[in-house]
Image (cartoon, coloured by chain):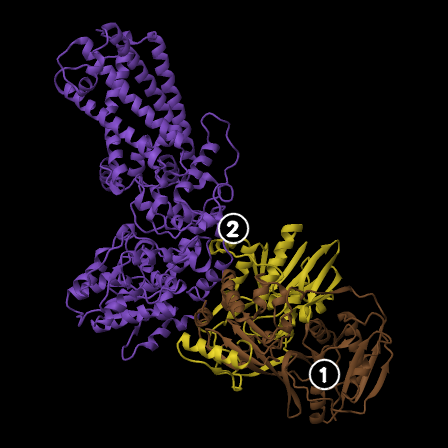
């Protein structure tokens, strides 16, 4: 009988993040195949009460309450996770591959001496052993990766890669946990959250977005697309590289580190389709992608594609609209 | 401020049709161009900017073959003061192994700050930096978008999702993994790189570091690579640009976003 | 009469001697100060090829065959110039006469010196006329190319020269009348009626006064030369002698240095980083404005005016190395004297250098300034990815090298040989990056391949092992990258045997021919296909579409390499087209926008160069504008599209035209 499948909760500002439910869903699936139980690990501040939002998602919820844990802190989480691992002896531990998860998982792996495979899009069991499925080269290839033999396996999962089919509806048992870890002032101290996505326009509310990526080439050429957007009544948005170069303000950015958008039509010009970007447009009604490279990953996510230079299409569109 | 930057040389695969090697465990690297990992470029620029402002030295560290040295030369040309390369020979390396090697190299260096890129362009794992920090027992933060130097601490901004940033302070010595967009990396001309040939570049073998294949055994092993399954994908619009434009406008009308 | 000129002067003889010595002394001091920056400047080997240089000196220095490109001012200048040459001796005569040193008698009435006296008279009148015409023209017609020049200086000098002429004519005429000699010179003819009315003592007075004034004016003028634009009187002939003999190539990063890595920096940081010849250029500028008048960047409203570039640099040089004032500490060029916008505005078309009567060089200076900017990382950031792509993939697009031969897939039934190490072939077709990857340029490549195949030429391409020729990066200022690409290509060339190289693009042609060190002949496809047509290896059936055609001379085919007639021969003799020539054709052709900087950096301008060129074609009534360069094709087609001129005029590539009737 294998140890439990453990899933770590990620929460922020009093809300449980979506990735948590993906991890719990996966834990549920794996536990059925491995013949063990899914357990949810929640580390929070005393009395924060987040366990309420997790009822039914796992067989057990292990709640660790400690001062300073209303916000994620890698040092504290590492210490408490370690305790939980020693107590529960899980088979597989599912962690979020988010900025916070990236700060925790590798440190936990080293401290606990357990193998970690990060940024997985899936975990499968082959003859009872877990194998990780990952993407490499920006999504151009898939990789199946095996762990070295171990009692416990750590895996961090990519947000958006697991379908959440609903609450599995467990009779959830709440376990509180008295930690033995002495509270020590962590070397990293939280100050505040800052929202950088504010701006003149809220792209997440726009019904029609024309979005530019690296293919635009030159800052000055953005105007050509701006003109088209104006003519068509669309809002301009972009992928990360444009904001990295300071060619457009942050509030135009679509993607995991930007905004998630759900327009009726999303016209992507010169965007390769890195998953972080695609994650931000999944909810769009119709995605039309224009990219010179017919093998660009965006064509996997789009409904319609044009393998052509974006400027040729922009000019042609302007010519058809006239004026 | 003494800063160490760990960098990686990766294949330049934009627009390249990747081929899987017969072993199925790697891609065909012949004919590919290689560049400095994009995240590491930002990390280097950050380190060098900090040094230019505050004084000190920057050391660039790379694990790779002699061919990979060119990115170390680029780092030196950008402004790093010295470079170290560890030649791993033919040993299979995963993130755990890499972090162990880096630990061995870095632990005896004087440093106030270690910077790495948040992840690598090829393997996209994002583990090495934090593993190194944990091995060295120093505080760390990942996906850092901004650094402000206050006495023996830094005020950092971590890039979370949806435009949210987390502001914290972290005590030195520390390790930070750097996110793209934190600065604008400077260009170094070919001549600049040639000039940097005069700067110090030391090479170590694993043996010289007291490591062997046993001590850097991998935690994870790639079993096979394969192409993404064709999941439907986009319906391609074909024809000359005018025709395609018409088709697009038709779709826009259908979806009700234009008249 | 006076046997000694000294007796003719009003002032004591010793005073005149003093004036002479002082003037000469000031002049020598000024010249010495002007030489100082030349010594501090960089090396420039210009003492080679004496025969060529002497012939240039004769053709361009003395015969000034460039001057009549502006007919009126050209002729006027030739008159003034030859006047100076002839009259120089006269001035010497008068000085020696004044000093009391025996020399050539200024009052000869027979023999060769009498003939000379008559000649100099003719010239004095011509020069006077020329100066008066110039003053009128400058004041009333105000040619636009004189804008930015010191008008005061111009009028002053023209007046001084006129005055020199008048005083000598008066001096001569009054002397003849006093002597009552029988000689008949023009000066006499002109002034005798007027002087008739004067008494001998009055004439004597005129004689002395005009003599003194002439000499004083001469000394003033002499000392004015090195501190005005008329320094060119002294430096122009040397500047022509030392002119750049090579066409189309860019100077090395630094002459006389083998290890460029040892230099603190590349390019131009301070004014003395220019070579001595460049500094001589600054001295020699006559402020005529012919360069700016033909500069496409200037005419399009860009920040660059070649004349002002030279004058600003000259003036900053003068501030740093003054004659009379205190030296300024400021020696930095970029940002202080010249701004980045000016530097990036240039398309290296060479129109300025083609016009300049004193052979001032511009392209090398601008590229040297770009070298500094690139090394400091101060170039437009869009270049960085282009440079990186070039280094890593051998093309500016960052496309993988394997895809360099993708264009071949569009050739039906034609095999293109992709060469490997050790292969032997008759003709190497060097395609270069744009013709390999850019869809519009690929049609030229396809047409060339078709043509070569039809003519049964044994040709091959390098394919993935071909690196970009580097013509763009060199002119953008990334010299190290250019040298890298050049090295790589030259190494590849050494592994393959071939008789000649042909290129699709005039820029590749220019760089391989003039920037590389190849022992084999390099041709542009127009030259090669003319030979194929002449030799009957390619035959044309049929005629091109009816219409009115004009031909646009690409800068790097025409102006930089002198290939004007070959494309015309193909068009007129073999394709039977009666070409309409635009006003600006051949070496006066107007650049389409360039093949480097402008592709990746928007330069501020009032009107696109290509748009102006299309207008020129429309002006001459053309329906079709033919060109032989992929970048001209791109820019001109773009201009037609952007300004809704489809249907009015169409761009046609020469090779596509040839294939259409094969």
Q: Secondary structure at mark 1?
A: helix
x and y, in percent, of residue C338 in the image: 47, 43
Residue displayed at 36% across by 20% down = C24
Q: Nearer the viewer, mark 2 or mark 1?
A: 1
Q: Is residue A262 left or right of residue A192?
A: left
For residue A272, say whether it is visible. no
Quadrant of the rendered structure where residue C85 is? top left
Residue displayed at 38% across by 55% down = C609
Colour of chain A, in one word, is brown
Dots 2 and 1 on the same chain: no
x and y, in percent, of residue C148 in the image: 41, 38
Q: Quadrant of the C terminus of chain C?
A: bottom left
Q: Is residue C638 left or right of residue A11?
A: left
Q: Which chain is purple?
A: C
Q: Is residue B132 above or below residue C177?
A: below
Q: Secondary structure at mark 2?
A: loop
Contact? badges 2 and 1 (CB < 8 Å): no
Dot 1, how many residues are within 10 Å of its Cα: few (below 14), some (14-19), or many (20+)?
Answer: many
Q: Quadrant of the N terminus of chain C?
A: top left
x and y, in percent, of residue C474 in the image: 40, 54
* Residue hosting label 2: C376
Q: Is residue C474 left or right of residue A147?
A: left
Label 1: chain letter: A
Quadrant of the rendered structure where residue A171 is? bottom right
Colour of chain B, in one word, is yellow
* Residue hosting label 1: A21
x and y, in percent, of residue B143 in the image: 66, 67
Q: Is residue C74 above or below residue A171?
A: above
Quadrant of the rendered structure where residue B124 is? bottom right
Dot 2, how many residues are within 10 Å of its Cα: few (below 14), some (14-19), or many (20+)?
Answer: some
């Amino acid at each position: 009988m294998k140890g439990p499948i453990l899933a770590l909760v990620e929460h922020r500002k009093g809300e449980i993040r979506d990735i948590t439910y993906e991890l719990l869903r996966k834990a549920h699936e794996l536990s059925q195949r491995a013949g063990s139980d899914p357990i949810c690990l929640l580390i929070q501040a005393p009395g924060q009460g987040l366990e309420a939002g997790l009822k039914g998602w796992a067989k057990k919820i292990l709640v660790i309450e400690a001062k300073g844990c209303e916000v994620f802190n890698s040092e504290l989480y590492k210490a408490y996770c370690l305790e939980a691992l020693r107590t529960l002896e899980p088979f597989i531990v599912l962690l979020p591959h988010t900025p916070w998860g990236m700060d925790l998982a590798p440190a936990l792996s080293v401290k606990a001496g357990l193998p970690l495979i990060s940024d997985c899009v899936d975990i499968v069991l082959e003859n009872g052993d877990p194998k990780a499925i990952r993407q490499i080269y920006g999504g151009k290839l898939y990789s199946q990766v095996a762990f070295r033999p171990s009692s416990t396996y750590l895996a961090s999962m990519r947000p958006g890669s697991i379908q959440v089919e609903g609450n599995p509806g467990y009779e959830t048992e709440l376990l509180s946990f008295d930690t033995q870890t002495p509270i020590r002032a962590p070397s990293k101290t939280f100050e505040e959250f800052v929202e950088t996505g504010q701006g003149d326009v809220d792209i997440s509310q726009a019904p029609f977005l024309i979005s530019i990526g690296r293919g635009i080439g030159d800052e000055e050429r953005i105007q050509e697309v701006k003109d088209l957007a104006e003519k068509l009544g669309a809002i301009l948005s972009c992928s990360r590289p444009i904001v990295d170069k300071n060619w457009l303000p942050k509030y135009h950015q679509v993607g995991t580190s930007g905004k998630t958008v759900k327009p009726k039509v999303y016209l992507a010009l010169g965007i390769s389709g890195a998953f972080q970007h695609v994650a931000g447009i999944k909810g769009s009604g119709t995605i039309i992608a224009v990219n010179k490279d017919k093998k660009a990953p965006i064509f996997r996510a789009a409904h319609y594609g044009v393998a052509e230079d974006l400027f040729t299409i922009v000019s042609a569109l302007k010519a058809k609209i006239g004026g | 401020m003494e800063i160490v930057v760990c960098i990686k040389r990766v294949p330049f695969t934009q627009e390249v049709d990747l081929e899987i090697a017969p072993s199925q465990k790697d891609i065909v690297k012949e004919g590919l161009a290689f560049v400095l990992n994009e995240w590491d470029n930002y990390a280097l620029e950050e380190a060098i900017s900090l040094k230019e402002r505050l004084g000190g030295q920057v050391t660039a560290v790379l694990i790779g073959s002699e061919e990979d040295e060119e990115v170390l030369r680029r780092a030196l040309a950008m402004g790093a003061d010295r470079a170290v390369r560890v030649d791993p020979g033919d040993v299979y390396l995963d993130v755990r192994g890499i972090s162990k090697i880096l630990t061995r190299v870095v632990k005896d260096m004087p440093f106030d700050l270690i910077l790495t890129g948040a992840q690598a362009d090829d393997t996209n794992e994002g583990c090495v930096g934090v593993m190194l920090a944990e091995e060295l027992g120093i505080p760390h933060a990942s996906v850092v978008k901004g650094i402000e130097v206050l006495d023996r601490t830094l005020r950092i901004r971590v890039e979370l999702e949806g435009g949210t940033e987390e502001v914290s302070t972290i005590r030195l010595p520390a390790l930070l993994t750097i996110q793209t967009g934190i600065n604008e990396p400077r260009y170094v001309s070919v001549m600049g790189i040639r000039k940097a040939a005069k700067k110090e570049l030391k090479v170590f073998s694993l043996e010289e570091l007291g490591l062997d294949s046993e001590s850097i055994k991998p935690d994870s092993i790639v079993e096979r690579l394969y192409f993404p399954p064709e999941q439907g994908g986009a319906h391609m619009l074909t024809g000359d640009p005018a025709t395609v434009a018409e088709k697009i406008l038709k779709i826009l009308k259908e979806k009700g976003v234009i008249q | 009469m006076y046997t000694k000129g000294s007796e003719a002067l009003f002032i004591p003889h010793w005073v005149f001697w003093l004036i002479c010595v002082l003037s000469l002394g000031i002049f020598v001091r000024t010249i010495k100060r002007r030489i100082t920056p030349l010594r501090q400047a960089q090396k420039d080997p210009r003492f080679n090829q004496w025969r060529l240089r002497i012939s240039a000196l004769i053709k361009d220095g003395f015969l000034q065959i460039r001057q009549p490109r502006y007919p009126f001012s050209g002729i006027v200048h030739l008159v003034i110039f030859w006047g100076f040459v002839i009259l120089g001796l006269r001035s010497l005569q008068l000085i020696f006469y004044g000093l009391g040193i025996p020399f050539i008698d200024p009052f000869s009435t027979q023999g060769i010196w009498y003939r000379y006296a008559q000649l100099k008279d003719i010239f004095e009148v011509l020069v006077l006329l020329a100066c008066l015409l110039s003053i009128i023209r400058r004041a009333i017609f105000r040619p636009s190319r004189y804008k930015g020049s010191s008008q005061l200086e111009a009028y002053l000098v023209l007046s001084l020269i006129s005055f020199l002429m008048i005083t000598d004519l008066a001096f001569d005429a009054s002397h003849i009348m006093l002597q009552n000699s029988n000689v008949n010179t023009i000066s006499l003819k002109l002034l005798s009626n007027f002087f008739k009315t004067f008494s001998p003592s009055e004439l004597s007075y005129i004689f002395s006064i005009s003599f003194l004034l002439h000499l004083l004016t001469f000394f003033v003028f002499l000392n004015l030369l090195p501190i005005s634009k008329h320094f060119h009187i002294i430096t122009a002939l040397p500047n022509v002698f030392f002119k750049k003999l090579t066409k189309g190539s860019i100077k090395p990063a630094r002459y006389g240095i083998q290890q460029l890595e040892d230099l603190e920096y590349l390019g131009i940081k301070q004014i003395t980083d220019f070579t001595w010849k460049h500094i001589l250029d600054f001295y020699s500028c006559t402020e005529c404005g012919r360069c700016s008048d033909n500069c496409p960047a200037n005419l399009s409203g860009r920040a660059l005016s070649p004349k002002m570039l030279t004058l600003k640099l000259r003036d900053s040089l003068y501030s740093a190395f003054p004659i009379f004032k205190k030296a300024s500490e400021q020696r930095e060029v970029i940002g202080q004297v010249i701004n980045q916008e000016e530097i990036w505005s240039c398309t290296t078309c060479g129109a300025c250098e083609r016009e300049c009567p004193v052979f001032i060089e511009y392209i090398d200076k601008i590229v040297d300034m770009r070298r500094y900017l690139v090394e400091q990382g101060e170039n437009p950031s869009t270049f960085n990815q282009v440079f990186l792509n070039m280094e890593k993939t051998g093309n500016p697009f960052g496309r993988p090298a394997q895809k360099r031969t993708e264009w071949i897939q569009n050739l039906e039934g034609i095999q293109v040989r992709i060469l490997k190490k050790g292969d032997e072939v008759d003709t190497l077709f060097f395609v270069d990056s744009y013709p390999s990857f850019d869809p519009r340029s690929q049609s030229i490549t396809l047409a060339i391949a078709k043509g070569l195949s039809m003519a049964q030429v044994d040709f091959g391409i390098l394919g993935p092992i071909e690196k970009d020729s580097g013509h763009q990066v060199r002119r953008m200022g990334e010299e190290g990258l250019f040298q890298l690409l050049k090295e790589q290509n030259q190494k590849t060339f050494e592994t393959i045997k071939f008789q000649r190289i042909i290129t699709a693009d005039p820029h590749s042609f220019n760089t391989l021919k003039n920037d590389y060190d190849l022992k084999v002949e390099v041709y542009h496809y127009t030259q090669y296909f003319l030979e194929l047509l002449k030799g009957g290896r390619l035959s044309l059936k049929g005629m091109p579409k009816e219409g009115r055609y004009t031909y646009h001379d690409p800068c790097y085919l025409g102006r930089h390499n002198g290939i004007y007639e070959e494309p015309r021969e193909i068009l007129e003799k073999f394709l039977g087209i009666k070409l309409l020539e635009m006003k600006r054709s051949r070496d006066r052709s107007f650049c389409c926008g360039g093949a480097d900087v402008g592709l990746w950096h928007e330069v501020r301008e009032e009107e696109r160069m290509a748009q102006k060129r299309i207008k020129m074609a429309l002006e001459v009534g053309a329906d079709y504008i033919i060109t032989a360069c992929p970048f001209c094709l791109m820019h001109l087609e773009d201009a037609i599209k952007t300004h809704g001129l489809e249907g009015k005029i169409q761009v046609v590539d020469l090779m596509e035209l040839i294939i259409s009737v094969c």
